[in-house]
Every structure is written in structure tokens, then in C-alpha cells.
Image (cartoon, grey):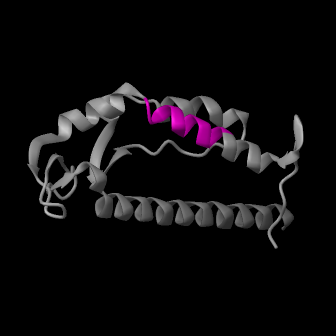
Amino acid sequence: MGKKTPDYKNWNAWTTARFWTFLRSALRVAWNKYPPKYAALKNASVGKQINKDTDRLAEHFRCNECQDCFPAKKVQVDHIHDAGTLKDYSDLPRFVERLFCSVNELQILCKPCHAKKTKEAKEASKCTKSKTKQSSLLFDDEILQ
């Protein structure tokens, strides 16, 4: 079983991690109503086309990565620069600033391109964390010697 985070000081029925998950989720719900998100979709619109899956007329959008056109249900609004983590109060200003960014910092990606970008970002983050941990251990060893 993983290490349990401490209880949240203002509501001990939650852990600190649960509180930050709750807050991150609430901010993302607010972001779903953020006007630049819809401006980014409007900028990527290529007009109404026949949806290949339903044979109905539907608004289509161009994926910024593969340049193919997709109906709304098959695209996602992506932050060009990841919003980052939200694990404590010191993360809050940067997370909010990056989450509620300008339309120029958003792009439309089809779901496969978005999944690929997300996977690459997670792998890069793991690699960076691993290198940071290794260099920290090396630094600790040097101090002990």
C-alpha cells in the first residue's frame, strides 16, 4: 500500500492529497466555461462537413498536429504548455495562470494526437523526476564522504 498523505488541516476526513485533487477538479470545471477555450475552437473550425461516423452535417475542427479534420466529439482543447501540478499552496498561482491562459497558448488536437502528446509529456516528467532523484542521491553521497 502506498504512503498516505497527512490529513487536511481544515477537514480531517480528507487527506491533503484529496483536498488538492478536489481543488484541481473544481478549477478544471471552471476552465470548461472559460471563453478562450471556445475562441480556440472557433479559430480551428473548418465549417460544417458530413461526419463520417453518423452521415450527418457537423462542425469540424482541424487538428494542429496531424492537420486532419474531425467533428467536435473527436477533438480536445490542449494547453501548449502544461498547467503543471497542484499539490500545495505554492503551486496555486502558477497552476491558475497556466490553466487560464490566452487563446494563443491553446491548440486543438484530435484525441489520438492529444493522447500521444500526453503520454510523451508523462514519460518526460518521469525521466526528469528520476534524474533529479539520482542527482540528489549522488549529492547526498558526496556530502557523506
- The quadrant in which residue 126 appears is bottom right
Task: Give the position of the N terminus as an image quadrant.
Answer: bottom right
Q: Quick check: 21 left or right of 66? A: right
Front-most of residues 42 and 65: 42
Taking the view exactly as shown, the residue that stands out farthest to the bottom is 1
- Image position of 51 with respect to 90: above or below: below
- Image position of 118 with respect to 76: above or below: below
Q: Quick check: 13 left or right of 73? A: right
Q: Is residue 45 visible?
A: yes
> In x, y percent, where is residue 9?
89, 38
Task: Give the position of the C terminus as an image quadrant.
Answer: bottom right
- Image position of 126 with respect to 86: above or below: below
> In x, y percent, where is residue 124?
48, 62
> In x, y percent, where is residue 18?
75, 49
> Does residue 27 belong to the magenta stretch?
yes
Residue shown at 42% from the left, 28% from the top: 34
Q: Which residues are magenta?
A: 23-33
Front-most of residues 11 and 2: 11
- Image position of 113 with respect to 49: above or below: below
Residue shown at 10% from the left, 44% from the top: 48
> Does residue 26 belong to the magenta stretch?
yes
Q: Main secondary structure of the magenta part?
A: helix
- The quadrant in which residue 68 appears is bottom left
